Amino acid sequence: MQHDSAGLKTSWVCLLIVGVGILAFGVVATVAPGSGDERLMRADGMAATGMGLFGMLITLVPFRRGERWAWYAQWYYPVFWIAHLAGGLPPGKDHVHQVVFIVLSMVGLLLPVRVFFPRATPTG
């Protein structure tokens, strides 16, 4: 069943932005790894590319349909970005993007809670 509420659309767009950001980092890290251990950066780039693609696919198909498992699976995004922020992990040194991705993923997951967990209707 496809859900087309404005709240759900806003939420999947937020999650899609996070996925595109991860995908973009992955592609850049794979193609132009920069300084340091080039092989490790390319491997990280390939992993990020896969993570971005899988996240986008989950967002665009089952999440938009309101499938509960997809809502649970997308909790990987805020956990991933909070761990990166708390650990001072790359990419980047300013960490602003991490805060932005945390906020976007949390909005994307909390806004449609009633789509994934509808209130029980009384029978009688």
Image: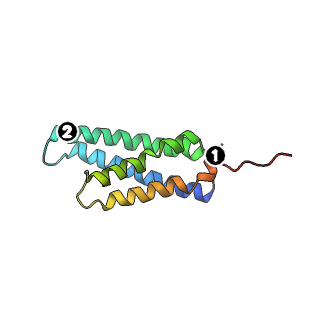
Q: Is residue 72 left or right of residue 76?
A: right
Number of the front mark, 2 or 1: 2
Q: Amino acid at mark 1?
A: Gln
Q: Which mark is first along the chain, 1 or 2? A: 1
Q: Secondary structure at mark 2?
A: helix
122 is higher (above) or lower (below) than 47: below
Q: What residue would you read off at disc 2?
A: 40
Q: What residue would you read off at disc 1?
A: 2
Residue at screen point 15% across, 41% down:
38
Q: Residues within 10 Å of mark 2 (few under 14, many from 20)?
A: few
- Measured as percent of width and height from the top left, residue 29 is found at 24, 46
Q: Residues within 10 Å of mark 1 (few under 14, many from 20)?
A: few
Q: Is residue 30 left or right of residue 3?
A: left
Q: Quadrant of the N terminus?
A: top right
Residue reaching furthest to the right:
124
Give the spatial CA distance, label 2 vs label 1. Answer: 41 Å
Residue at screen point 50% across, 46% down:
59
* Residue 66 seen in render: yes
Q: Is residue 119 left or right of residue 98?
A: right
Q: Are marks 2 and 1 in contact (CB under 8 Å)?
A: no
- Measured as percent of width and height from the top left, residue 70 is found at 53, 41
Q: Secondary structure at mark 1?
A: loop
Q: How many marks?
A: 2
- Measured as percent of width and height from the top left, residue 92 is found at 24, 56
